[in-house]
Image (cartoon, coloured by chain):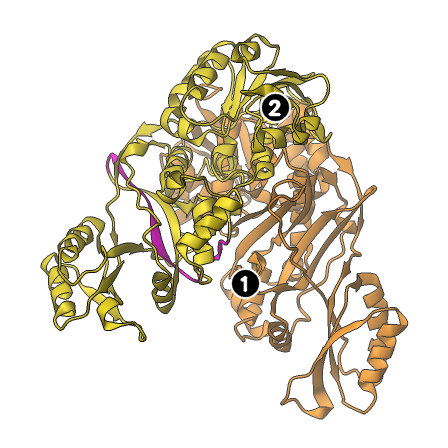
Chain colours: A yellow, B orange
Amino acid sequence: MTALKPGVTKVAILGFGTVGSAVAKLLSAGYLPGLQLALVYNRDVARKRASAEARFAGPDVLWTDHFEDVLRSDADVIVELVGGGEPAGTWIEQALVAGKSVVTANKQLIAYRGPELARLAQANGVQLLHGAAVAGGVPVIPGMLQGLSGEAVTRVSGILNGTCNYILSRMERGDSYAEVLKDAQRLGYAESDPTADVGGFDARAKLCILARVAMHAELDPEQVPTQSIAAIDAIDFAYARELGCTIRQVSKAQQLSGDCMYARVAPMLVPLDSPMAWSQGTQNMVVSTGRFGGDVVFSGHGAGGNATAVAVVSDLLAVAQGARAVTLPVQPKGVTGDSVAPHYLRFIVDDKPGIVSAISGALSKVGANIDSLLQRRGYPKHRLPFVVTTEPTLNSIIAAAVDSIAAMDCMLEPPLALEMLVVDDKDEETA
Amino acid sequence: MTALKPGVTKVAILGFGTVGSAVAKLLSAGYLPGLQLALVYNRDVARKRASAEARFAGPDVLWTDHFEDVLRSDADVIVELVGGGEPAGTWIEQALVAGKSVVTANKQLIAYRGPELARLAQANGVQLLHGAAVAGGVPVIPGMLQGLSGEAVTRVSGILNGTCNYILSRMERGDSYAEVLKDAQRLGYAESDPTADVGGFDARAKLCILARVAMHAELDPEQVPTQSIAAIDAIDFAYARELGCTIRQVSKAQQLSGDCMYARVAPMLVPLDSPMAWSQGTQNMVVSTGRFGGDVVFSGHGAGGNATAVAVVSDLLAVAQGARAVTLPVQPKGVTGDSVAPHYLRFIVDDKPGIVSAISGALSKVGANIDSLLQRRGYPKHRLPFVVTTEPTLNSIIAAAVDSIAAMDCMLEPPLALEMLVVDDKDEETA
């Protein structure tokens, strides 16, 4: 049980924030053999060096705010935690070309440029690992890369954004969107501009990485449709519960026949007895559905510096030992966000006779059948929320009908249309 | 993204039963690059060759009932699916010495002899992989080996035996033990002698493998205490529900200070709002608790030929590509099944005045405090079931008290003592 590469592997950390300092803490905790922190890069490095977290770095560590020092150093592996497209992308390229392996948690960069950077790593005989890019400390990527490499995965779905899950699982208990968002910002779960999280763009990058790892499909993140959770109201949780559901931001990608794949990030109604409904707070969850082994669920607290640092140092051990996962060829695929599903449509109207007839008319015109109509008591006639659910219908057809309904005079707000997630009956032997 | 080892890797399957034929099916399905089934060994091989599943093996496969043919063949890797201690152990040794890698689902063999066989594989420059030995198609072992290698795992607990989970989750819905066991046998979930499953011996082997993979501890399976689920009665589910719990066969191993580790397999009361309570049917579930990243949950259908075959062919791809997981040094540890926990004690008595006083006396004599006393209406006085729960107390102290209580004249059946699992408040940042 010896390491394949003897001696000590020297580590440089780029970005000494929450995750970076947690990585330093784990490296200094004494339970990880063969790894040594050699260098920390950060802008305004003097401030970081004076921080309480600097004690985890040890006295012999070189502190710098010049990236060139990192390239010139004897670090074997670089932990990239600055995030975003640039300069992270250029720095990773330069490190790989300089013969240094790279471990990164940068989901945007890996989603947009992963295969290209993997080829560059291979050409330079080094590794590029990104186990922390999806679900932080939950080993979804390593588990799929190795443990599900022999599965024909047909669908990956999950809760990939802890901020949205925190917001929605608190709204489920009766708090308002605005109030919960403010709390999330105060607790450091949400940015001051929460668009990347609530708009679905963070989850979209992770979904594209999962599609690549689990289904060997290369998707263009820009083609994956997203829907914001910002339009969800307390009333939607009340109606969802009447339907045996709650609401979660769901990321879903599914094999279709041909060169196209379904992929979408949107708030959806999920059945209360499904694993996704159980995820609370900042929890992440991924459900992989395979042709042979059925459903496999991974879950845990994805966010947080310590959890993400666990994934980073696990990748560092792999670099140190020359451990490698199975790799399978990846194919580019087109994307559609269109699928056949039952839908939840919520309207807020100034109630007048004939509204239900007009709405059902607009739906039947496009061929969408109404499955149920829900109207809770206790709301004023002049601002009445009510809900229609449809039988399984294409998202795009529902969208067209909702557009025409939105134009009606009585509509006080744009209607909300949510896909309702159907949980398959799971046969143990699926093939 | 090319394989490290070019060309085709030839596979021999030892044992063409449910899993073996499923492995052949996956290998013939055309989605796994670089793997070719070359040979099938089975006793009475003519019968297997005439079976419907033989079509998955293809026309060029060599069928044999002589193990020597396997050793002499040009197979690069042997899939051992005959199970049990011998001859599987000797065959694996011979294959490794002959320079053939081995992929096995044999939990008993890996639990008892894993490190020794791993050293033999290393000495011969080949691989020994056993991803299918725990939780079948749920990638717990690969996920932990790679994705949690950087975590300081303090506890592993889970539902590791699908048969027991099928029985207990059906009893939860009101069926009797005897009735459900009969169904499990008819469905092929339970053996005609169910001792290995219901007695906890199957789960114990898997728990020892998990302790090794997740916590780098080498346990002697014989030292891990087990408790059978056979004494659980319908009334226990009724009382458990009053306590906000259900009953599951739980396997749990936990780091202690020093050279000893807690490990135990037993039916326990688990809170209804904990992941383990949600597992239904033959589902498997593993919860890993880490010092840094908190809880990570893996779950899915562990049993079944197809799910297990997914784990086997994933290991075959790793062998074919020379992929290797991180390895960390393993330390032998002693085992105790003793831990401080609240307990559920169920008595069936011929009711007379003074019984409660006698029981509480026996408990207070050993220092165990009663937390609650439950007695449901509607049972006859001459055969009255009632329940006492205790404050957190050592298992061994409870056992001593229960022994003395069992000797009382009024006891119509041996009392049942179950540990009550306490779910920690999970802090996201645990260290």
Question: Can the viewer see residue A178 in this picture?
Answer: yes
Image x and y of residue B33, in percent: 40, 28
Chain of the residue that carries numbered disc 2 in the rendered image = A
- Decide: is A396 above or below B269: above
Secondary structure at badge 1 equals helix
Label number found at residue A47: 2
Q: Position of residue A282 (x, y in %)?
A: 51, 48
Q: Is residue A12 visible?
A: no
Q: Mark 2 or mark 1, which is nearer to you?
A: 2
* Residue A121 in magenta stretch: no
**What amino acid is found at the position of numbered circle 2 in the picture?**
Arg
Q: Is residue A361 above or below residue A26?
A: below
Per the model, the C-alpha gap separating discs 2 and 1 is: 57 Å
Region rendered in magenta = A258-280
Q: Quadrant of residue B242?
A: bottom right
The image quarter in which residue A7 lies: top right
The residue labelled by disc 1 is B166
- At a point 47% along the width and 18% down the height, the residue shown is A92
| Foreground pick, A378 / A202 | A378
